[in-house]
Image: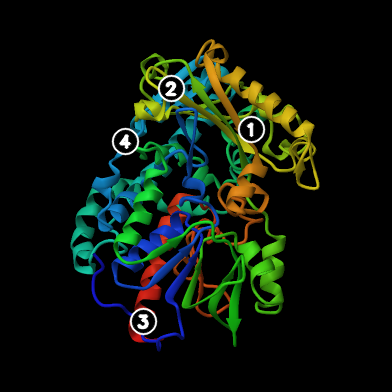
């Protein structure tokens, strides 16, 4: 139950809640769970019929599919935060084995040294770039060791100060070799991976292959990405939806409220201070603090009064670029999980060709989707109950743009017959590539559903269906990196905070967990001291 006393110091009737949270993505739920646990009167308003945002799942004909994110990396955040909220044992997360596959090579990745398998294979494909690949391999492992060191660092967000201080000397000794690469990592935070590789790699196919993922991804993150994915977790029961479901349940158990089917249309602002929200239908809800987990662009262009924020701030929001979206194919397959030939790997990155296209061609080249990196997920390897007996769920995802294929064949945002045809065409291309790993997959499909960037935009309200908030490109993003982290959730409107992947770049689930925890602490202490 909630710890401590209710904190509101306002007079009855003046404020309905201490805190209203807009959206139940992972950032909003994390903030709400911490606040409710400490006795804060919190309300979450969610436009959909269930919590989760990008963490949502859906069911069709006995199959359960994860709609957006397909698991979550720990990064020293996920497990400690769920443990502190007394949810880790209830959710029962299991590590998901990872692999990287080429047309002629399958590389399971269970430990850092396994990265050598990828680069050694590429040396056979690109023999003239052998020296460059040796350098990339060495740098990638160095960067992975730095990221691993920070993932295991004493964490003041979830540990008492004294305990963290006492653990620090041992941590420094254990990770001394890894931390030696910190200077190199910081030097690669502001340069996109393709630009960095171009300084010493000549083969454009190799540069494009190693730059696959998010356009402009800083070299430091791109080269250490697979290391973080080796620490990827998936619920043993209930699919990805289990994570937001348990967070929402924790909020309710501790006296908080979650309203579904409740779209916040306006944020009430008085004298430069957020004082509440107005939801669809006209109801006004007063609160001392507002935490926004939604698209920050929409927030300041549509939800606050005109002139409420400085023109330069509003202009920067509109001029900054958002991330790519995703195209997803959800398959119900007549194949038992043990027949899936992935050596038990629940997540596989498949590069179907060595002649991939530049991410800058995603809008203009219709061949992009046939030659792009695919993330393949096999959730029934973790939970057989996600499919009928003897069958499996297979999910294929790739980077996508809302502007591709003449906006996917929509007219004024509405689907036409061409929209459906485009979905089927791209899905067919992805399935054909997936058959390089799972022969005859197309013949075993019982159920097939596709989603486009328009689908993601509709369910999350993210601009252009952005999958991780702002672009990863360091020169085009609104907020870059972890510097200034504790200020990244502040907004120009007093008592209005931002959480989730719109707070920083690179974003994603770790940004949601981190900012949800940080903002909950800030708000809780401001409530306690009446400031």
Per the image, the residue denoted by label 1 is 208
Bin the neighbour count of mark 4 within 10 Å (Cα to Cα): few under 14, some 14-19, many 20 and up: many
Of mark 2 and mark 3, the one earlier in the sequence is 3
User: Is residue 341 at all visible to an observer of this figure?
Assistant: yes
User: Is residue 207 at all visible to an observer of this figure?
Assistant: no
Give the number of the mark in front: 4 or 1.
Answer: 4
Per the image, the residue denoted by label 3 is 8
Task: Give residue 141's position: percent from left, percent from top.
Answer: 41, 37
Of mark 4 and mark 1, the one earlier in the sequence is 1
Of mark 3 and mark 4, the one earlier in the sequence is 3
Cβ atoms at labels 4 and 1 below 8 Å apart: no
Q: Nearer the viewer, residue 156 or 434?
A: 434
Cβ atoms at labels 1 and 2 below 8 Å apart: no
Of mark 3 and mark 1, the one earlier in the sequence is 3
The residues bearing labels 3 and 4 have C-alpha atoms spaced at a distance of 38 Å
The residue depicted at 52 percent of the width and 11 percent of the height is 439
Within the image, what quadrant is residue 523 found in? bottom left
Question: Element under label 4?
Answer: loop
The residues bearing labels 4 and 1 have C-alpha atoms spaced at a distance of 36 Å
Per the image, the residue denoted by label 2 is 392
Of mark 1 and mark 2, the one earlier in the sequence is 1
Cβ atoms at labels 2 and 3 below 8 Å apart: no
In the rendered image, the vertical position of residue 464 relative to residue 425, given as above or below: below
The residues bearing labels 2 and 3 have C-alpha atoms spaced at a distance of 49 Å
Within the image, what quadrant is residue 493 found in? bottom right
């Amino acid at each position: 139950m909630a710890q401590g006393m209710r904190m509101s110091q306002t007079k009855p009737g003046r404020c309905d809640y201490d805190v209203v949270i807009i959206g139940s993505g992972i950032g909003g739920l994390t903030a709400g769970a911490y606040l409710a646990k400490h006795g804060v009167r919190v309300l979450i308003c969610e436009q959909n019929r269930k919590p989760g945002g990008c963490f949502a799942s859906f069911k069709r004909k006995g199959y359960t599919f994860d709609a957006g994110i397909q698991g979550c990396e720990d990064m020293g955040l996920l497990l400690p935060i769920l443990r502190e909220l007394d949810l880790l044992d209830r959710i029962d997360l299991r590590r998901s084995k990872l692999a990287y596959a080429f047309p002629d090579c399958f590389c399971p990745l269970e430990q850092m040294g396994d990265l050598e398998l990828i680069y050694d294979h590429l040396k056979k494909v690109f023999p003239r770039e052998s020296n460059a690949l040796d350098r990339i391999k060495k740098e990638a492992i160095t960067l992975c060791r730095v990221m691993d060191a920070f993932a295991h660092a004493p964490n003041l967000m979830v540990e008492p100060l004294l305990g963290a201080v006492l653990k620090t000397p041992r941590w420094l000794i254990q990770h001394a070799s890894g931390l030696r690469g910190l200077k190199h990592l910081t030097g690669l935070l502001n340069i996109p991976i393709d630009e960095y590789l171009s300084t010493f790699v000549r083969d454009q196919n190799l540069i494009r292959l190693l730059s696959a993922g998010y356009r402009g991804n800083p070299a430091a993150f791109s080269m250490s990405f697979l290391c973080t994915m080796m620490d990827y977790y998936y619920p043993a029961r209930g699919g990805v939806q289990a994570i937001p479901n348990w967070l929402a349940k924790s909020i309710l158990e501790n006296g908080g409220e979650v309203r579904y089917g409740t779209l916040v249309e306006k944020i009430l602002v008085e004298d430069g201070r957020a004082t509440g929200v107005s939801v669809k239908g006209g109801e006004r809800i007063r609160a001392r603090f507002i935490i926004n987990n939604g698209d920050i662009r929409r927030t300041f262009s549509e939800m606050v009064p005109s002139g409420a924020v400085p023109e330069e701030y509003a202009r920067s929001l509109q001029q900054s670029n958002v991330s790519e979206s995703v195209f997803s194919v959800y398959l119900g397959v007549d194949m038992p999980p043990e027949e899936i030939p992935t050596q038990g790997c629940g997540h596989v990155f498949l590069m179907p060709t060595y002649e991939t296209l530049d991410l800058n061609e995603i809008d203009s080249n219709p061949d992009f989707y046939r030659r792009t990196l695919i993330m393949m997920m096999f959730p029934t390897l973790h939970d057989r109950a996600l499919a009928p007996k003897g069958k499996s769920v297979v999910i294929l995802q790739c980077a996508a743009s809302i502007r591709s294929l003449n906006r996917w064949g929509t007219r004024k945002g509405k689907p036409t017959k061409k929209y459906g045809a485009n979905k089927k065409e791209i899905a067919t291309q992805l399935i054909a590539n997936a058959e390089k790993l799972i022969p005859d997959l197309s013949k075993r499909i019982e159920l097939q559903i596709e989603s486009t960037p328009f689908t993601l935009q509709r369910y999350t309200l993210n601009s252009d269906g952005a999958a991780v908030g702002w672009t990863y490109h360091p020169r085009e993003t609104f907020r870059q990196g972890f510097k200034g982290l504790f200020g990244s959730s502040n907004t120009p409107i007093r008592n209005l905070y931002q959480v989730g992947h719109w707070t920083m770049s690179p974003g994603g689930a770790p940004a949601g967990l981190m900012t949800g925890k940080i903002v909950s602490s800030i708000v809780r202490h401001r409530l306690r001291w009446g400031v």
